[in-house]
Amino acid sequence: MDIAPRLQQHVVFHLTGKREGEGIESAEGRGLRPALFARFGDLTKLRYDFPLVLAEPGADGEWLRTLSGVVDETLKKVAPAGLAGERLRRNVLRAERQIRSELDEGEGGTLLELWDEAAQLLTARGGAEVEADLARARAALGVDGALVDCDAATPARVVTHAWRRVQEEKSKRARREIDALIVRLSDLVKGDYMRSEAGRHAQALKSGFGGAHRALFDFQKMADLLAKPSGASALSPARRRRIDAALAVLRAQRFFADKNAHEFVFDEARDAIAAYKRRLPEMAELVKAMTVADLEVHGRYLEAKHDALFEGFGPDSLGPQDHARFPDYLVCRTADRGRKGGGGAAARALLLKVLASGAPIKIVLESGTLLEDTLSGEGGFSLGAQLAASAMGMGEAYVLQSAASHLYQVRGRVLDAMRYAGPALVSVYSGARAAAAEESGPPPYLLAAAAMESRVFPAFSYDPGAGADWAARFALEGNPQQDADWPRHEFAWADDKLQRHAETLPFTLADFAACDARFARHFARVPREHWNGSMVGVSEWLARPDNGVPETVPCIHAVDAGGRLQKLIVDEKLVHAARLCAQSWQRLQELDRLKRKDIPAAKEETKQEIRQDKKAKDEPKPEPAQEKREPGDPYIETERCSSCNECTNLNNRMFAYNENKQAYIKDPDAGTFKELVEAAESCQVAVIHPGKPRNPKEPGLDDLVKRAEPFQ
Amino acid sequence: MTTATECLLRMYEEHHSLEDYQSGVPRWCNGCGDNAILAAVQRLCRDNDLAPERTVFVSGIGCSSRFPHYMKTYGFHGIHGRALPIAEGVKMARPELDVFVNTGDGDCCSIGAAHWVHAVRYNMNLTLLLHDNHVYGLTKKQASPTSPIGMTSNTTPRGAYLEALNPLTVTLGIQNVSFVAQAVDWIPELLYDIIAAAYRHKGFSFVRIIQRCPEFLPKMFDPWLHDPNRTLLLHHEKGLKIGAGTAKVYRNQREHDPSNIHAAREVASLEDPIPVGILYWNPQVPCYEDVRHAGQLHTPAQVKKGLEGELDKYTVWPDAGTPEARPQAA
């Protein structure tokens, strides 16, 4: 066979997209998919992370579970090990598969609802034993909540569930605080009333007394007795006004209310930010009322100091901690063009503006498309594919990117994003649009997973609250074979003679594009008889030195609907997109490597400081400085004094306590040498040293000096 | 960064001196170890600026239990052996308060032993100081559970018959134990550091303080006072760091990791030398008040209803038997 003309045809297609000659065919309409997908057929028969259970708050605090996880745990609880539990295990696993099928057919509901439907169906087939097994397992499930399959709605449903959980925690905390302040302020008001003339009036006293014994008392007499000033002062008019005003604000607030509460979920970022801005004065009023109330209930409001500051207290006075106490705003939208709220340049600018604003707005951005149809014009990648990386540059916004298939793995990060005090972007590729566009195409779960595999949509997070530098803030995690440019997998196939061949295939952007029928024109099928050595894998092709006229063409492995291996040449546009994708992945890897390196050179100074600080902490505490004293002066080892009062009771002019209530010799001449010796003898911890006698005329010195010897 | 709100709240800041916590002249004997504990606790309050109106000392009966009288804070001089239930009640109702318990070897380890065991298990955020002088001093020298075998007293004139109870090993044997330390009153620096660590621990901090009773057991601890090597100082980066001055006098030291409960139990069994330091520390044990959601808001209506319910149980109704005479329940 003449290879050169074939290569010529292949190169022409690669560079121009033109298919000419018999060695090259159209890839369209053949139901081709990447070779590595050959193993995945009907997902409903597989056990994997979907469907997810949006768990209602329960004892274990888990907010997101997988159906398989729930079933496994249930089986651990109810099914005995070995053969004894085999039947129960099989029945429960059948129920799990049935639930998957029901969801796949478009049914929705909670875990228990779908469980019951599945149980009904399986019982009809299997009888009473199945019914009993499934009822037993149902009782042990221990969790309920909506079931979510992998589709366009998944990102919004999962993140909204996390958001709601966080808001409930916040709201509970705030409500507890506000309610306590209301009760305690009301107590002050009530106390004030009881001390007032009206409160001590006979009628008021009568109304506060139990009915049965009312007649036995003379309330007028009691009122006369109480009319005398009791000494307790009433609230000043200014304080009363402050308390009343704070109470009114606390009672009327709409941020943490059961009824008439503000709405915090929006379709559009611009509505969310408008609502946030509109409510700022109201927020400031509430923070002010809570602060005043806190000071008042502890009797710590100082009019001279506080009045002026509270007068000027407004939205500008609110700090990050104040904002963090309030509910966050949630915006769920799509990044895809052509869908409602979809993403063009204006949408991109607005989203970045919101993320840069510092406002507590959480954006869930769902993408169904990562590569634009044309692969030209706007650079080939869609808004969804690019926004998270751009948003990291905003600095103070929490950014999380993950494909929907990995939402369960990054659930901790989702919750962190919702808890973060500031704006957050959760960008999720659902794989849903492309799947819908091609009826026979791979399901969204597979597409989402493929997006992560191919590095088109890698998982990473940026948490500004985690530290001051990139190393602390950025995390590249959950991506397959993270150290490699492209993940590689073993692939085995059989030829016409049923001989097994195995090779390692990388999964590149071109493979990802091959999942989507819209990109079929960027591929050309080469019939098997025309395969030759000049057809090399995309990753190999990208790594080759660029020296003018190509001698090879990039291709990928694919399988058709019948499971037959095909090779597809990839055109330059798609290969260019793969090149950009690899570069972008390498940038992320570089960022991630910062974490693994030792503290970089620029931080050497800080490192020194840390070391010194640590050293200071580790070193034993220094010995306290000794007071200057002449030889022969009496002294006390003050830091060892056990404050037992022996010496101070003996002579409190000579011995005194310092600020730590430990003794020292205040004035050695304020007593006799005898007292010094007696103090030394009675000191339980023997820390008094009498020194030499200061008055040579003191009687009995010889004996005293002898007694003092052991304490010198 | 300090926000305007924090700044406003902090404007009323109080700084206290030791005198702000001193109340009256202690009636303890000269030389009593209680004085050292009082001084250390007053230092702790001052150094942490504890608001006197938010600090409570609860005690039972005994010399040590006079402690709340000498603190200018809230105090509750309770009944014999019952300091812990009272302190637990206070903490449950007002979890924001700092609650300390002062108890003696008789009060805690004898009549109050049941409460002690369960307090360890509850692991409420309290700091217990066990003033252990091995004797009932207030009632003039009777043997206590920690009196060493052979000790003569008014109740054991021929010498105590039983081995002394070891409060450390007992505490370390109870579920949910989270902080156990031992101090001696004659090393004030460590006494302070240990009490400070106990205060910082969130959970039930059990600090046994071996203290001298100069009146009834004047020579009991002389061997340890005279020979610093008979005191074993425990130090660790997670536990105590010993000052240079103390380290120079007490050279018998051991590195002991307070997160190791088995090592803690071994050290706790030592009687001579006396171990001093933090034996065990586990900040992960949940506190009962958190588990039971203490500090739930009691609205006036709830309080009124509860009180009326309780009082109604004891009310003598003038027209007994005629329900209409009774007020309608709220």
Image (cartoon, coloured by chain):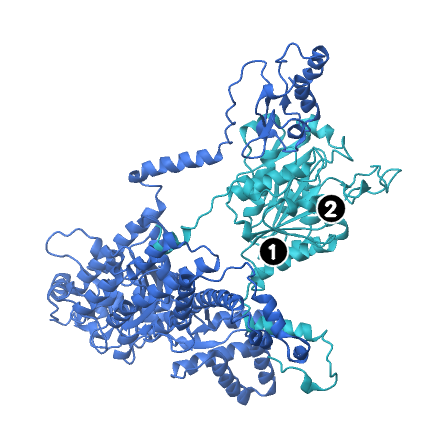
Chain colours: A blue, B cyan
- Residue at image location 15% in from the left, 52% down from the top: A546
Characterize the local packing of mark 2: few (<14), some (14-19) or many (20 or more) Cα atoms within 10 angstroms. Answer: many
Sequence-wise, which precedes: disc 2 or disc 1? 2
Q: Regarding mark 1 in the picture, which secondary structure is present there?
A: loop
Question: Residue A425's spot in the image, x, y percent?
Answer: 30, 64
> Please, which residue is most extreme toward the bottom here?
A124
Vertical side of A588 occupied by A452: above or below: below
Vertical side of A84 occupied by A500: above or below: above
Question: Residue A521's spot in the image, x, y percent?
Answer: 17, 72
Q: For the residue marked with disc 1, what is the amino acid?
A: Met
Q: Regarding mark 2 in the picture, which secondary structure is present there?
A: loop
The quarter of the displayed image where residue A690 is located? top right
Q: Give B39 or A274, whichever is nearer the viewer.
A: B39
Is any part of residue A382 visible from this angle?
no
Left or right of residue B303: residue A51: left
Quarter the C terminus of chain B occupies? bottom right
Identify residue for label 1.
B124
Question: Residue A132's spot in the image, x, y percent?
Answer: 60, 83
Identify residue for label 2.
B62
Q: For the residue marked with disc 2, what is the amino acid?
A: Gly
Q: Are marks 2 and 1 on the same chain?
A: yes
Question: Residue B71's spot in the image, x, y percent?
Answer: 61, 45
Chain label for disc 1: B
Is any part of residue A599 visible from this angle?
yes
- Residue at image location 11% in from the left, 71% down from the top: A20
Left or right of residue B323: residue A533: left
Q: Give A327 or A571, whichever is nearer the viewer.
A: A327
- Residue at image location 41% in from the left, 81% down from the top: A103
Q: Give A273 or A60, whichever is nearer the viewer.
A: A273
The quarter of the displayed image where residue A371 is located? bottom left
Q: Give A167 or B96, whichever is nearer the viewer.
A: B96
